[in-house]
Amino acid sequence: QVQLVESGGGLVQPGGSLRLSCAASGSIFSIYAMGWYRQAPGKQRDLVATITSGGNTNYADSVKGRFTISRDNAKNTVYLQMNSLKPEDTAVYYCRHGMAPETIEPGYWGQGTQVTVSS
């Protein structure tokens, strides 16, 4: 059974940075695509970024140039570096572990970590 543990969320001022981590266990991490979603209060869960097993990345337009997804296969961990944060980035961020090398759908969810951007 795949388990995902997210960390790194918190309260940050606009313009600040955070790095989210998602540690996976119970899978051969390196062969699967990984990703991050986010869900703001009262809104649907939206895709933020993905990274394939080969390291190809994709981003939502709203975070391009500000967020960077990366992975460390030796640590079974995927990261989301978030820079130039805006209040509209406030959401619960969820890690997603795919079941294939190139896609995160279908997949497993982490428990989520809260990110709040406010002055």
Image (tube, rainbow, N blue to C red):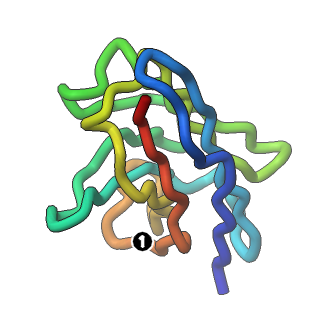
Task: Report the residue marked by disc 1.
Answer: 107
Residue that lies at the very extreme toward the bottom in this rendered image = 1
Q: Residue at x 75, y 43 (%)?
A: 73
Answer with left or right where residue 29 lies relative to residue 40: right
The quadrant the N terminus occupies is bottom right
Residue drawn at x 48%, y 47% as measured from the top left: 115
Query: Which residue is drawn at the image coordinates 45% and 45% (left, top)?
Result: 116
Residue lying at the far front of the rendered structure: 119
The location of residue 79, given as percent across then percent down, is 62, 39
Number of labels in the image equals 1
Q: Position of residue 72 (x, y in %)?
A: 74, 38
Depth order, front residue of 84/72: 84
Q: Position of residue 77 (x, y in %)?
A: 71, 48
Is 92 left or right of 8, judged from the image as shown?
left
Q: Residue at x 83, y 47 (%)?
A: 75
From this view, report whether residue 74 is shown above or below residue 40. Answer: above
Front in this rendered view, residue 90 or 74: 90
Q: Is residue 113 above or below residue 84?
A: below
Residue type for callout 1? Gly
Question: Does residue 6 sit above or below 63 in this rendering?
Answer: below
Mark 1 secondary-structure assignment: strand
In the depicted view, which residue is nearer to us: 4 or 93?
93
Quick one: label 1, few (<14), some, or many (20+) residues within 10 Å? some
Q: Is residue 74 left or right of residue 69?
A: right
Quarter of the C terminus within the rendering: top left
Q: Residue 28's spot in the image, x, y percent? A: 71, 63
